[in-house]
Image (spheres, helix red, strand yellow):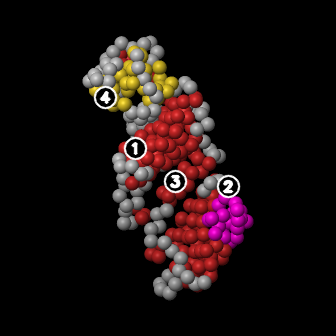
Amino acid sequence: MLDPKGNAVSRLAPGALRLLAWFLLPALAAAQVPTPSSPLRAVAVKGADLHLGPDSQSVVVGHLKPCEDVAILERSGNFAHIFVRVSGWVPDQGLLPIGNLANAKPLFAEGARLEELAESASGQIATAKNAERCFYNVYDDFRASPLSAEALYRAASINWQLARADIPQSSDPSLQRFPSTHWLRLVTKKFPHTPWAEQAAYLIVDTKLTCGIWSRKPSCIDKEIHAYRDFLKKYPAGPRTAEAYYRIAFRQASAASLYRAAGPKHDPKKAERYRQSLAATVASMQRRFPPHQPGNRWTKKAESLLDQVQQGKHVGP
């Protein structure tokens, strides 16, 4: 498994791995150039070429990615001698010392800029990975920052979306593979009872939606309804609560339609049971998310589902 920095994850705790890495860093750097006894730990906001000397015309020996952690070995004029996989010189700009919590803000802003750019520019995957690294390092390098919870969630969300796009869609939903939920679960573990934990948990629900085409196995709809109900038990009030209620309502409406329709699945009693369940869900949403309250748009969508079912119209994906 890889972390959002692209590093392999071992059985050691993340803190232990990080501590080990920074104990080894001076020794690794020393193999190439003399280093100070205590290199300054920093994170580079922008990417740059690494040069052999403190001169932009000197030989390029490597490349610094946006938002990478570095060790600043020394400074000369407008250049800094850093170590990141190899040692080299870069313009001494945007190298933010990790010990200063205020530096989390520009790092977070760069992640947000890259994330937005990834949605519209060419080379979206590379840009999205850079945004992921920026957000992850806000969490990893500035854990006491008030931005760290949101940053870890946004890094985990980007990681999840990129990994999911790489997995082929299975013709049999029950055999569908999903990316590791490790980083999403890390959000729920490190920042419980926060909106970001709820957002992460909502993405994890996707791994339980494996019914596929409901008309082939309408009884499986209950499995997906229970997945959303389990989510609501843990997160009864938050940014995804109303949407989770609507997802339940949509499945109840679809089941009512399937059992009402003529054919081998026709079962009026089950159709009525799901219609009543849908009505109860809508009533609950009307109490919890009335007009002019956040989440009311989901209430209106659920009310529309109930109207369609009561009018005998088909509801389904």
Q: CA distance from mark 3 to mark 1?
A: 24 Å
Q: CA distance from mark 4 to mark 3?
A: 38 Å
Does residue 136 appear to the left or right of 289 in the view shown?
left
| Magenta highlight range | 280-300
> Amino acid under label 2?
Ala
Residue 246 in the image: x percent, y percent? 60, 66
Residue tagged 3: 204
Secondary structure state at the residue bearing disc 3 = helix
Residue occupying image coordinates x 53% and y 70%: 221
Residue 93 in the image: x percent, y percent? 44, 26
Residue tagged 4: 62
The nearer-to-camera label among 4 and 2 is 4
| Front residue of this view, candidates 48 and 162 | 48
Q: Residues within 10 Å of mark 3 (few under 14, many from 20)?
A: many
User: Going from the N terminus, do you reach mark 4 or mark 3 first?
Assistant: 4
Residue occupying image coordinates x 60% and y 69%: 301
Residue tagged 2: 237
Residue 137 in the image: x percent, y percent? 49, 35
Residue tagged 1: 127
Secondary structure state at the residue bearing disc 1 = helix
